[in-house]
Image: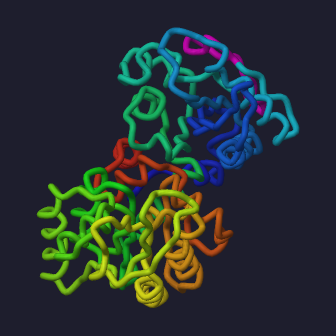
Amino acid sequence: MNVLRFSDLVQQGQVAGKRVFIRADLNVPQDDAGRITEDTRIRASIPCIELALKAGAAVMVTSHLGRPTEGEFKPEDSLAPVAQRMAELMGREVPLRSNWVDGVEVAPGQVVLLENCRLNAGEKKNKEDLARKMAGLCDIFVHDAFGTAHRAEASTYGIAQYAPVACAGPLLGAEIDAISKALAAPKRPLLAIVAGSKVSTKLTILQSLSKNVDGLIVGGGIANTFMLAAGLKIGKSLAEPDLVGDARAVIEAMKARGAEVPIPVDVVCAKTFAADAPATVKAAADVADDDLILDIGPKTAALLADKLKAAGTIVWNGPVGVFEFDSFAHGTETVARAIAASPAFSIAGGGDTLAAIAKYGIEKDVGYISTGGGAFLEVLEGKTLPAFEILSRRAAG
């Protein structure tokens, strides 16, 4: 994918004295008192800002935070806590500017944070007049918020259309590189893990991946629907019987080109959905009518681990069992540790996947951890993200 990169502009000496507008993803979790509880996104955004400042740019940064009502400011929607945390991390003042659409004063070597961009009327619908006003604030627009790359909004898409120069920041560039490496030109065999509670929410992903991957590992409630498609009983486990035909079609499409969807050979069951429910390992064919399947069994986990260790590329979205309950976490831990031990290039994304990576402390052993939930899923669906499309178009001139 050919996009202009901000780092290249810096190296070419095209940034000094320029007004640079960075769209970051600073949408961090906060407690009821408005205190930031986890600052990963703020930390991740700083390298791009520092790059612009060191190059002598006048830097403006904005982001959304939460789901504010456009045109109605409420204190809880303010980026003030973000500005404070950013100032602490950068060791410099980061003034917060409100009502900034009609003009911002910022000098080269300075950075200002522009108040929550979703407060601007017309942001979500990408209104042209708002996008043009934003574009008029800068010489260079830098998109560095992969978490919003699947949305065509004024601060993510419209501004990129009308700014004199539009490019990808280091975070967005890294996502483009990792996605291209995993999906556009993967080292084979390419294995994908797609897990979650419902086939319906991931059906288009499963269908898209089934045309490309060498192995499609399903987990969670999705695996239960695939077990039904393979003629197995699943007791009272979570599943979508009306999608058994779709699951069977994915299995057949994979089989037709010599690829496979490994169906569990054993499972971990309980009679109730609870952390302290007694766990029983059973052969996949022996699930009782009153059983709940809450994890893959040890034999299945070992088979999958062998496949993952022999892979060339791994795409991971979702834990394969109820890993929040220790009795039903063995499958996800085995898969996670196999990915960590594999020489394959691995890319992982999605909130639950990131929680599993953190739980087992394998952050350094995953090739790339994607920062965007919805955007990551849309890439797996085979969609072209709006941010990628407009930046590619601008790069082509």
Q: Nearer the viewer, residue 180 or 58?
A: 180
Q: Nearer the viewer, residue 205 or 290?
A: 290
Q: Quadrant of the C terminus?
A: top left
Identified at 17% across, 71% down, the residue is: 229
Q: Nearer the viewer, residue 48 or 122?
A: 122
Magenta range is: 97-112
Q: Main secondary structure of the magenta part?
A: loop
Where in the figure is residue 357, as x and y percent of width and height?
60, 65
Q: Is residue 181 visible?
A: no
Identified at 47% across, 14% down, the residue is: 70
Q: Quadrant of the N terminus?
A: bottom left
Is 111 in the magenta? yes
Q: Is residue 50 visible?
A: yes
Residue 361, quarter of the rendered image:
bottom right
Residue at the extreme right: 91
- The image's colouring method is rainbow
Residue 325, quarter of the rendered image:
bottom right
Residue 287, quarter of the rendered image:
bottom left
Identified at 48% across, 29% down, the residue is: 155
